[in-house]
Image (cartoon, grey):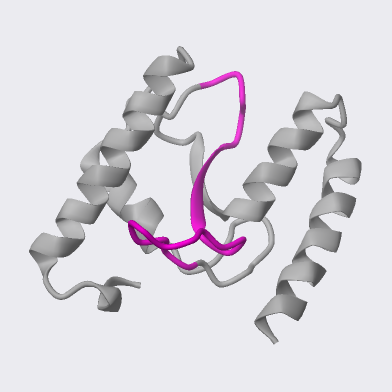
């Protein structure tokens, strides 16, 4: 993904902008935020969604977001953006997991079924 950027400085600026946006979002939502620049850098460099295995993409400023764009997932929603609780997932998988939790579908079996269907949809879109 880094090849989308002309220089290390441009990449670092991108990482910082994503870090600041996530920090501000967490503050508004009153969620603990302890991510470092290095943690954000590692998340944004991830190649595959931790849930679906879909190849992750980056959304540049001004571009329309895609279901495969990298998103930061809090594994345990009761914890914040802290070491050991954040992973890289595709935007669609993160949205689906959030919706299932908000609607009381918290069992892994139910979430897995929904994510499997979503993965099939993404795979068709990439073909």
Q: Whole-percent x and y of residue 102?
A: 77, 25
- Occupied quadrant, residue 90: bottom right
- Say whether residue 48 is left or right of residue 94: left
Say above or below: 6 vs 112.
Answer: below
Q: What span is in magenta?
A: 57-79
Quadrant for the C terminus, please. bottom right
Q: Whole-percent x and y of residue 21?
A: 33, 36
Q: Residue furthest top?
A: 30
User: Residue visible at 51% across and 58% down?
Assistant: 65
Q: Whole-percent x and y of residue 125?
A: 71, 77
User: Residue visible at 48% across and 39% down?
Assistant: 86
Quadrant for the N terminus, please. bottom left
- Say whether residue 57 is left or right of residue 37: right
- Occupied quadrant, residue 111: top right
Say above or below: 21 vs 79.
Answer: below
Q: Nearer the viewer, residue 21 or 52?
A: 21
Total marks placed: 0
Q: Nearer the viewer, residue 63 or 70?
A: 63
Does residue 85 show up magenta in the picture?
Answer: no
User: Residue visible at 79% across and 60% down?
Assistant: 118
Say above or below: 101 vs 115.
Answer: above
């Amino acid at each position: 993904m880094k090849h989308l950027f002309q220089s290390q400085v441009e990449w670092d600026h991108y990482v910082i902008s994503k870090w600041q946006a996530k920090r501000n979002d967490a503050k508004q939502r009153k969620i603990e935020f302890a991510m470092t620049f290095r943690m954000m850098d590692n998340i944004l460099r991830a190649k595959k969604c931790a849930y679906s295995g879909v190849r992750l993409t980056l959304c540049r400023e001004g571009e329309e977001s895609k279901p495969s764009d990298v998103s930061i997932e809090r594994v345990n929603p009761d914890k914040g953006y802290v070491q050991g609780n954040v992973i890289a997932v595709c935007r669609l998988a993160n949205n689906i997991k959030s919706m299932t939790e908000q609607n009381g579908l918290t069992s892994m079996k139910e979430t897995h079924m929904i994510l499997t269907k979503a993965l099939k949809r993404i795979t068709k879109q990439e073909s």
